[in-house]
Image (spheres, helix red, strand yellow):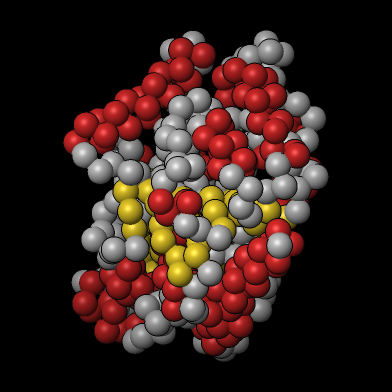
Amino acid sequence: MNVVILNTAELTGGAAVAANRLMKALNRSGANVSMLVRDQKSRDPRVVSINNSNLREKFNFMRFVWERLVIFLSNHLRRKPLFQVSIANTGTDLSSHPLVQNADVIHLHWINQGFLSLDDIKKLIRIGKPVVWTMHDMWPCTAICHYSFGCERFKKECGKCPFLSSSDKKDLSYHVFNKKRFLADSKIQLVAVSTWLRQQAQDSALTNRLPVEVIPNVIDTSLFVLSDKAEARKSLSLPLDKKIILMGAARINDPIKGFEYLVKALSILKERKGEEDYFLVLFGGIKGDDSFLSEIPISYVWMGSLSDPSMIAKLYAAADVTVVASLYETFGQTIIEGMACGCPAVSFDNSGQTDIINHLENGYLAKYKDTDDLATGIKWVIDNRESLRLDEACIRKVHDCYKESIIAKKYIALYQSLCNKRE
């Protein structure tokens, strides 16, 4: 079976990493899978970039700029939500690309920022081959936003978009929403990476008639493994005598990652037990000024952006607990990677992470936006990790539900069923 995975980037961003891991898992399971991207980093022969010349690369960059410019102008020259929305007004027609033509199944992942336009998606559908679309955020079922932040207009019809600070019923979100209505009759097979995300798709006026399967992301259990905590701390020059709390994100100060809630929870912990017991480790990028780090009430170290998975695995091994204070998580990649290394997680109980964390069994689900409960969860994990063998429970959950062979098998079965229906 030939499958082509379409994603904007090969390795940049959570969706890209997930799609790339899936490609490798599927190939190891007997499928013939290639990845078609715009932004390529590796020399993997199974990954093909559409930027096959300097001129093409510049042209595709201008597509990205054009989309952002339209959003910027529609948002009254406000930059703040510029990357919280996408409109897919421009992209590359890949319907005649050899990898697409030779594929039995076309598998879309995260295709925004000028990679595919809505018209390009229509052309892929018209080929007549099975099209699978894995949702890594809410964009496939909303007009323009990747996370709705509680807005429910996508359930009927978008307009008066809060991201655009708009009071106009027929604003940019309205027009994009209506342009996306073709999805309702497209027969695309949606895949949500969590039960919560499936519910969003089922509630949307754009996608509530489409079939939606829940298949989580792949975790490489040969890379993310349990290892000696003391050795990991020594190799990373981290304190041996502290309770280490870990937080990681692509961008630490992205509002959706809830850094302010972690800071408040740490302040509560400090008041309860004293600063000397805890140490915070942060990894990930920071956009703009890093002065917000001065708000952290305990000792900490910021490791910067990390791209080496073995280094990230070592951080999980060194930590006592991973904290994910995100306002929304469609899946929870940081949670699952940490659990594979035996590091329990604390997170809010509101979205995709509820599939992964079994409350008081392998981690702690705090009440949404409740910093006092978040602090309680951090302390509970630290106090009970050894006595309740939480590390063993974490590893067992990962191997039972998220191992690459399990996820690959689910996707191959889905591909086969779609191909059989077509025949």
Q: Quadrant of residue 179?
A: top right
Report the front residue among 414 and 212. Answer: 414
Report the front residue among 159 and 410. Answer: 410
Q: Quadrant of residue 183?
A: top right
Q: Report the side of 312 relative to 396 (left or right).
A: left
Judge whether 14 appears above or below 215 on screen: above
**Horizontal and vertical percent for residue 177?**
67, 27
Q: Report the side of 31 relative to 63 (left or right).
A: right
Report the front residue among 38 and 157. Answer: 38
**Horizontal and vertical percent for residue 259?**
47, 47
Report the front residue among 420 and 89. Answer: 420
**What residue appears at the point 50 percent right and 62 percent down from the top-left corner?**
3
Judge whether 220 appears above or below 206 on screen: below
**What residue appears at the point 30 percent right and 84 percent down from the top-left corner?**
230
Judge whether 82 appears above or below 413 on screen: above
Residue extending farthest front = 423
* Residue 188 visible in the displayed image: yes
**What residue appears at the point 54 percent right and 65 percent down from the top-left corner?**
217
**What residue appears at the point 70 percent right and 42 percent down from the top-left corner?**
186
Q: Image quadrant for the C terminus?
A: bottom right
* Count of numbered marks: 0
* Residue 247 visible in the displayed image: no
**Horizontal and vertical percent for residue 13?**
40, 51
